[in-house]
Image: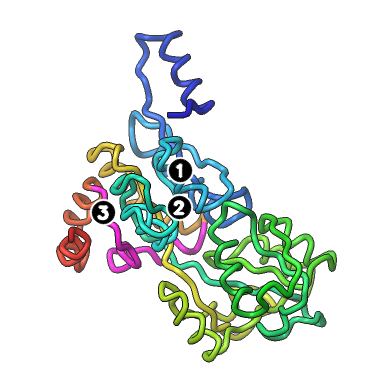
């Protein structure tokens, strides 16, 4: 396993003070600073550190969800944000993870769906999905799952007839504001903080996905499901915006102990009101939503807690994911 700076510092600490109590270190992979997943990870890390003894959790800035799965498989982080599609494929060693070791990455906690945002400015050239053809389009950074979703969308819309800018969300929003791109694509949990910031400075619009376009997309990519970004999520967008997305949440290495995962799951669930102050998505997490979208089995520590609090459908979920 590659020795990260965090592991190196921990090893050094054990040599300097062998008699001192040693905290267990755990990293949660997220995305670049400014993205929703980083905000979530930082909030979760803070809650665990305050409520679980003997552990030190950090939110790690990464290139995104695709990179997170690779870091988990390599043992460089212990937990991460991921979509339900990528986490299932990694657990089953199928799709892009074919040939890897199966069973290493387990489900932990569904947080909120990610929704495809097609972000443009009022008065600009983008008024429909079809208008993206031939335009300058922000696609998300390499290593992030949002870029893969953008690739799928633009492949359906324009083939190769567009100019792609593969940069992080914050940079895309700056480029859109400055007129250097015509639209920014991002599949993320709403609200997106950089878009909130942009809407305070410029007149923002979200481009809707028509039923016909979604039907064609879903026929080619079945994991996507229909959803809407509610009106009022962003200051300038009063009405609901029909789009599509994926389930989104926490996954964790099978190597983390059952008791430790149980303690962390309990701490998170008992702090959802506090976490809702960090990001509104936590206000929608409940016993009824915590399994949403997952196809890989639960970590035994999470399963123990969910059984204890009586999560509806838990035994059916266990039966379905144990096959």
SS state under label 2: strand
Along the viewing direction, whichever of 31 and 42 lies nearer the viewer = 31
Using the image, tell me which numbered label, if any, was put on residue 72. Answer: none
Which of the 4 quarters of the picture holds residue 175?
A: bottom right
Q: Distance between the residues labelled 2 and 3?
A: 15 Å
Residue 221 falls inside the magenta stretch = no
Q: Position of residue 294 (x, y in %)?
A: 32, 63
| Residue at the image point whose x is 41% and y is 60% from the top | 95
User: Which residues fall within the magenta stretch?
Assistant: 279-299
Q: Residue furthest bottom?
A: 212
| Residue at the image point whose x is 72% and y is 83% from the top | 131
Dominant SS of magenta comes to: loop
Marks 2,1: beta carbons within 8 A = yes
Q: In this rendering, would 46 be left or right of 309?
A: right
Along the viewing direction, whichever of 85 and 208 lies nearer the viewer = 85
Which of the 4 quarters of the picture holds residue 199?
A: bottom right
The image shows a total of numbered marks equal to 3
- Residue marked by disc 2: 81
- Residue marked by disc 3: 298
Q: Distance between the residues labelled 1 and 3?
A: 17 Å
């Amino acid at each position: 396993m590659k020795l990260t700076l965090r592991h190196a510092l921990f090893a050094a600490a054990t040599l300097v003070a062998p008699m001192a109590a040693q905290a267990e270190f755990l990293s949660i992979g997220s995305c670049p600073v400014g993205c929703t997943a980083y905000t979530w990870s930082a909030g979760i890390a803070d809650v665990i550190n305050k409520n679980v003894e003997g552990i030190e959790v950090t939110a790690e800035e990464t290139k995104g969800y695709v990179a997170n799965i690779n870091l988990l498989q390599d043992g460089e982080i212990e937990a991460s944000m991921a979509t339900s599609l990528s986490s299932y494929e990694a657990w089953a060693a199928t799709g892009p993870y074919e040939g890897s070791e199966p069973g290493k990455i387990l489900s932990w906690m569904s947080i909120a769906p990610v929704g495809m945002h097609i972000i443009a400015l009022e008065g600009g050239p983008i008024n429909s999905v079809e208008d993206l053809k031939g335009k300058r389009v922000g696609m998300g950074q390499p290593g992030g799952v949002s870029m893969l979703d953008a690739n799928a969308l633009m492949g359906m819309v324009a083939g190769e007839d567009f100019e792609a800018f593969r940069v992080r969300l914050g940079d895309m929003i700056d480029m859109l504001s400055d007129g250097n791109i015509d639209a920014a694509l991002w599949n993320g949990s709403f609200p997106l903080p950089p878009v909130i910031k942009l809407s305070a400075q410029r007149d923002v619009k979200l481009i809707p996905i028509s039923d016909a376009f979604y039907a064609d997309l879903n026929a080619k990519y079945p994991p996507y499901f229909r959803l809407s970004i509610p009106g009022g999520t962003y200051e300038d967008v009063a009405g609901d915006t029909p789009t599509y997305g994926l389930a989104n949440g926490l996954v964790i290495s099978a190597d983390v102990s059952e008791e430790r995962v149980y303690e962390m799951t309990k701490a998170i669930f008992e702090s959802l009101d506090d976490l809702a102050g960090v990001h509104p998505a936590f206000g929608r997490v409940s016993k009824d939503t915590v399994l949403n979208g997952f196809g890989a089995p639960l970590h035994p520590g999470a399963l123990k807690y969910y059984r204890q609090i009586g999560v509806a459908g838990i035994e059916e979920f266990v039966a379905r994911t144990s096959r």
